[in-house]
Each structure stands twice: as structure tokens, then as C-alpha cells.
Amino acid sequence: MKSSRIFTRTALGALALSLSATAFSADWRYAHEEYEGDVQDVYAYAFKEHIEENSDHTLEVYRFGELGESDDIMEQAQNGIIEFVNQSPGFSGAWLPAAQIFFVPYLLPTDEETVLEFFDESTAINEMFPELYAEHGLELLKMYPEGEMVVTADEPVTSPEGFDNKKIRVMTNPLLSETYNAFGATPTPLPWGEVYGGLQTGVLDGQENPIFWIESGGLYEVSPNLIFTGHGWFTTASMANKDFFDGLSSDDQQLIRDAANVAYDHTMEHIQGLAEESLEKIQAASDEVTVTRLNEEQIDAFRERAPQVEEEYLEMTGEDGAMLLEQFKADLEAVR
């Protein structure tokens, strides 16, 4: 009888411990916009690794298409169906107009070291943007650059006149459309899943993306002329549903912030040299690829059209946009 009671107490203690562990563990979900091995995927898995190594929580990562396209996963995150989401301001601009600042051409430098220092130290990035995202039910964890934007087209282009009548695919972002209008092209919004086919059939004449995405998505196969215009960087953001985040313990909130910092540092190391590596893969895979790097005189012809895009940005965003742009420029000046 005594040994039976001891066994019962032991079993109940083990059960209580098990229930306690269960109560403090959770299965979380994280969706992003890219393929296996791409920059957002690298970030997501570094984030996942830190979460799982430092807690009893698990994190399931969903790549492009597994839960839908970018707009779909954002809607799921804002509705609390998934806890974490990674989305570019290129898509967020429709509901967060100030985020379109990344599409003012020639605002960000092309120098990788300067860009990385800017994202590390910028007041606009690290203090102002979190407040803007919070107004839309999102806890901004990190904004980070993925790579310099490269345009692909059906022929090499060296001047704005070369873009005349060319249908260039853009994200559903009003300011990005304004940029390509300023460049002389015909901006054509299209979901990512339709871009390859659109280029292949001539519905599109070109598109823009970081070079690693052009390589991993095989876009060079149907749009082989790569044009380095130097007009901007692709930027993205990792976020949590704010109600979810605010409802967590302080320990779990700190766990998530630490995971975001670790993932950011890991990803910034990953992107260094990635553009050159991706271009080498493209050139090794296709003899049809051409690479056009605009010289300063050619860039100036595009750059002189940037002020009209900045003016449009200010009209779209009002006082919030003006304050953000002013701080953005001050932050850039500080790291140049």
C-alpha cells in the first residue's frame, strides 16, 4: 500500500510537471514571401532556431505559396491566424503609405557597407517605423535590407528613353508605379505568381528584384538583360501580431526580440557577397544574359527624375511622411 501511494504521488508529480511544461509551451507560425534558401528564409530559420533552442516553444515556417501570396499572409497575421509574418513595404504601402519611402529612387546609397550601417543606426528605422506598424496591429521586430534592386528587360536599357512603352512589373505599390512612370516605363502591377509567365509570353517587358531573387526565381531565363540602375534596395520587415505579442509574458517578449536580433545579425552576414555569387550563377547558367551597369552620367539621367517621385510621396503621406523623410535623410547623412 505504501509503495502504491509513493507511485501515485510520483505519477501525479510527473503529470503536474508535464502539464506545467505544456502550459508554458506553444506552437507558433511564421510566414514569409520567398523560396527555400532565399534571404527571408534564412532570417526565418535563424529566428526559429533561437526560439526553439531557448524555450519549449516550436515555430513552423511557411514559405512563398504555402499559405498564399504576400497579401494573404499579411491578412492572416493581422487577424491573428498566424503569429509572425515577413512582408516587404512594397506590399505594405497600400495600407501603410509612409512605408513607401523605400521606393523614392536614389534615396538609399548603393554601397553595401553604408546601407547596413544605416539600418543598424537609423532612428527612422528603429524608432519611428515601430510606432507606424503598431497603429495597424503589428509589432515590428526588424526591418532589414535584402539586396540592391536590379531591373531585367527584353533588351539592354541605358537611359529613361529606353524604358519608353516598356511594361515593367511592379508590386501593388502606388509610389513604385510613380517611380517607373518617372523613368518613362509603363508600370504594370502583377502578383508574383504571374510574373514568370508574364515575362515569358510578352505580357511584361521587364521587372525589378534583387539579383538573388532573379536567380532563384529563374527570371533571367525569360528576361535575360540585367540592368544595374543603382536606384534602390529591396527592404523587408519581420513582424508579430501585436495582440499576440502584447499578451505574452515579459520573458517570451524578450525571447522574441532576442531571436529577431540574432536572425538580423545572421542575415546581414549572409547577404554580404550574395549579389556577386548570384550573378555568377546566372552567368554560368545562361549565355543569353547581358549585364549593363549604368555609369554616373547615365545614372544622372534617371536621378534627375527622382524629385517628382519624392514630391508624390509627400502628397500621399502628409505630415507623417514629411517627418519620416526628414529623419531618413538625417540618418543617411550621419552614416555617409
Image: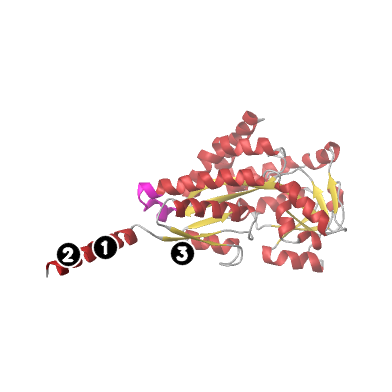
Label 3 neighbourhood size at 10 Å, few (<14), some (14-19), many (20+)?
A: few
Name which quarter of the figure residue 65 lies in: bottom right
Q: Please tell me which of labels 2 and 1 falls first in the chain.
A: 2
* Residue 81, numbered label: 3
Residue 256 spot, x, y in % from top left? 45, 49
Mark 2 Cα shell of 10 Å, populated few (<14), some (14-19), many (≥20):
few
Placement of 158 over or under 8, stated as above or below: above
Q: Residue at x 63, y 60 (%)?
A: 36
Q: Nearer the viewer, mark 3 or mark 1?
A: 1
Quadrant location of residue 325?
top right
Residue toward you, 20 or 218: 20
The answer to whether residue 190 is above or below residue 161 is: below
The secondary element bearing badge 1 is classed as: helix
Q: Position of residue 161 (x, y in %)?
A: 86, 49
**Mark positioned earlier in the residue sequence (3 or 2):** 2
Q: Residue at x 29, y 63 (%)?
A: 19
Report how far apart the C-alphas of labels 3 and 1 lie in the structure: 33 Å
Mark 2 and mark 1 residues within 8 Å of each other at the beta carbon: no
- State which region is magenta: 241-252
How many numbered marks does the figure carry?
A: 3
| Residue 85 left/right relative to 202 | left
* Inter-mark Cα distance, 2 to 1: 12 Å
Identify residue type, mark 1.
Ala
Q: Quadrant of the C terminus?
A: top right
Residue, x 59% and y 61% (percent of image)? 70
- State the residue position of label 1: 14
Q: Which mark is residue 6?
A: 2
> Magenta: predominant secondary structure element?
helix
- Who comes first in sequence, dot 3 or dot 1? 1
> Was residue 242 drawn as part of the magenta stretch in this picture?
yes
Alpha-carbon neighbours of circle 1 within 10 Å: few (<14), some, or many (≥20)? few
